[in-house]
Image (tube, rainbow, N blue to C red):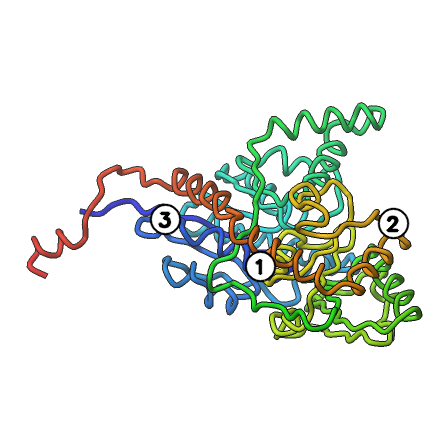
Amino acid sequence: MSVHKSHCLIFDAAVSATTRETTQRALTNCAHNHVDYTILTKDKKSWQKSEFCAHHNVQFSLLPDWVSQQSHSTLQRWSSHFILLLMLLWNLGFRRKKDLVIGISNPYLDKPLYQMRLWFGFQLTQFVQEKFTPNASSGKGCCQSDRLFYLPSLAEDIIKAIECFQHAELPEIQANHCAQIKFASLNAQEMIPDLSLSDWPSQCQYNTPKLFWSASSDPNESFLDIIESLKTLSQQRAIQGAICFRKKANAILHSQYEAMPMTPIKGIEWFENAPYIDALRSQCNILLISPNHLNVERDVLFAMAAGMCVVLPKDNSYWDNQLTENIHCMKYQPQNLQSLVETINALLDDCDLIYQIGLNASELAQKIQGVDSYKTISRYINQTLEPRDKTVVDTDIVKKRSGI
């Protein structure tokens, strides 16, 4: 007896490797015995190494390396968009019908899905894991997706995008209020990263205060505050630290990064595309978080698990609301250089404070149940992909009855 197998398309237009890693982790517990998955991606190797691919029936449709919807070249952006539409048309129109399509980046990068949906009418789930510029097109995508899972740090961008889409003609305060009401009415849920035992970072050292800043993409303009604070500190005292970032492959760098070279700061080492982030992090013990820090949820959780002392801006963000100052972290006033310098100085003067806060943070990291949000994701996807034929066939019984 044959049972209908559902088919899910995963659209991976992600810029950040962290986005793929989080998605792979979130989808690990999705149905595998009655579902086939097609992944449209430029990074096949990353997916093949994942636990998701090890336990699911996956096939790939590869995107050209040069495709970039964030290029500064108008010609390249439009060419990339056209190629994505063609590849989606092939996968959606000329291959098996898709019961569910998942966009894993943000509504701007996943915009081709919304255009294809007008033709094929599939169920669309949108993950919002990468920062984007709020505009009417992105706001429309957020409102039209069947289900929205988003990182808490990107909630404000989603609200601003909805505001651009539906309420641009209203006064700013009224438009924002209406957009928040609309956002609350969406079928949306926070997506809180968690750590498996295999992901758990190495314990940091407590012998010497050492600063650490890391991002899974190019530094953004808010990073300038970190640079200025380190310059000021290096002029006042001896400091040690490491700055790590990943340059986007096959993409033109943002103008603010072009104007921000690896500034020489005494005691600070720069690492570009370093493959050994865990080792570098374990040699430090103070994580600096800048306002609008990319992938802040995951970076902070890794630092807490490693026993580091996290220095956060007081910006009413997810971790600002979750962590208690002087117990699980240290905090500073955003856009206030003096506040940041004073906060770092207090830690550099007190190794015992770094140790105690790091210990409290590590204990809290072990209690955080981010996996609950992943269970919600897998539960929703499994329900959406339930086979139309409700008859469940035990293949072992079939084999025994057939004498196989």
Q: Residue at x 32, y 41 (%)?
A: 387
CA–CA distance in space, label 2 to label 1: 27 Å
Residue 305 circle label: 1
* Label 3: element kind: loop
Residue depth check, mark 2 versus mark 1: number of the one nearer the observer: 1
* Label 2: element kind: loop
Name the kind of residue labelled 1 in the image.
Ala
Q: Nearer the viewer, residue 300 or 128?
A: 300
> What residue does disc 2 label?
335
Task: Give whichever of discs 2 and 1 has the lower sequence position.
Answer: 1
Which of the image's four quarters has the C terminus?
bottom left
Label 3 close to label 2 by CB (< 8 Å): no
Would you call the spot at circle 2 few (<14 residues within 10 Å), some (14-19), or many (20 or more)? some
Horizontal and vertical percent position of residue 82: 64, 54
Horizontal and vertical percent position of residue 108: 68, 47
Name the kind of residue labelled 3 in the image.
Ala
Image: 209 above or below 176: below
Residue 261 located left or right of residue 30: right
Does residue 15 appear in the picture of this structure?
Answer: no
CA–CA distance in space, label 3 to label 1: 29 Å
CA–CA distance in space, label 3 to label 2: 46 Å
> What residue does disc 3 label?
31
Task: Give whichever of discs 3 and 2 has the lower sequence position.
Answer: 3
Q: Nearer the viewer, residue 246 or 391?
A: 246
Horizontal and vertical percent position of residue 125: 53, 41
Name the kind of residue labelled 2 in the image.
Gln
Task: Give whichever of discs 3 and 1 has the lower sequence position.
Answer: 3
The answer to which image quadrant residue 205 occupies is bottom right
Residue depth check, mark 3 versus mark 1: number of the one nearer the observer: 1
Q: Residue at x 85, y 71 (%)?
A: 261
Image: 257 above or below 9: below
